[in-house]
Amino acid sequence: MQILHPFAGPIQQYLKNMSDPDRDRPQHCPQCQANQPLVGHGFYRRTLVDVGFDGVIPVRRYLCRLCRRTVSLLPEFALPWLRASITVIALFLIARLLQGLTLAAAAIAASQSMMPYQRGQFWIRRFRQQAPALSLALASLTAPAAAPDLVTRALQMLESIGWIVAHRFLFADLRAHLLGWPDFLAPQGRRATLGPVAPSA
Ligand SMILES: [Zn+2]
C-alpha cells in the first residue's frame, strides 16, 4: 500500500532526507492498525520527471510486523503509476485546457518540450474523465467555481486549492487519484495481487 510521505518540499531536499529511516517512520500500520512502529524495509526506485529533474528517486518502504504487509511512502509531488510529477501535469493541463495553448506549447509550458504529444493527450483524456468526480470531491475544500464546463471547473478548483494540497487530500483521505486509477489498480490503488510479505526466516 502506498501512503503519502509527510515531506513537502523540492526533490533535492527529499533525496537528502532519504538517508534517515527514522525520520518519517510510520508509528502505526495503516492496513491493520497495529499500534507499533513499522520496521524499515528498504526502498523501491521509480522514475520521476519534474521541472528540472528527470531521473530515478528512491521511495522508502516499511513493513508491519503484525500483518506482514508493506507500506511505501510516496513523496507528495509524485503520483502513483505516472512518471510525471504533479507540477508537470498541472502546468500542462492549465496551459492546454485553461489557456488554450497548442499541445506543443503546453508541453513547453510544462518544461517538457521533447515529450511525445501522445503523453499530453493521455493526461487530457484521463483528466476529462476525472473532472466530474474531482469537482465533487474537492467541493469540501473550496467553493465550486462558476465555470462553463466541468473540466474548467475542476481546473479552477485545483488552481485555487493548490494541486499538491488537493492531491494530498484526494489520495490520503479518499484514495482517489488526480487522473484516475488505471484498471490494474482500481478501485483504490491497491494491486489485486497485493498480499502479505512472506516472513523472513
Ligand atoms: Zn499491519
Image (cartoon, grey):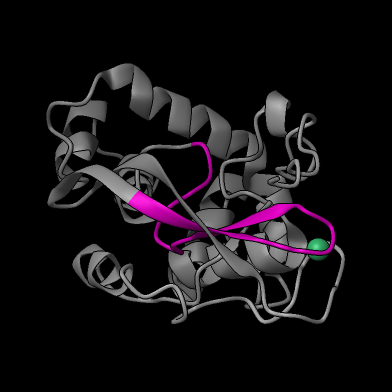
Please tell me whether residue 130 belongs to the stretch shown in magenta: no
View extreme (front): residue = 201
Report the residue at 45% width, 25% height from top: 122
54 to the left or right of 3: left
The magenta-colored residue range is 58-81
Among the 4 quarters of the image, the one containing residue 46? top left
Q: Position of residue 78 (x, y in %)?
A: 42, 53
Quadrant showing the C terminus = top right
Among the 4 quarters of the image, the one containing residue 112? top left
Q: Nearer the viewer, residue 172 or 128?
A: 172
Q: Is residue 60 above or below residue 151?
A: below
Q: Nearer the viewer, residue 17 or 126?
A: 17
Q: Position of residue 74 (x, y in %)?
A: 49, 58
199 to the left or right of 5: right
Q: Position of residue 151 (x, y in %)?
A: 56, 46
**Residue 99 visible in rendering:** no
Q: Position of residue 195 (x, y in %)?
A: 80, 39
Among the 4 quarters of the image, the one containing residue 127? top right
Please tell me whether residue 69 belongs to the stretch shown in magenta: yes
**Residue 39 visible in rendering:** yes
36 to the left or right of 22: right
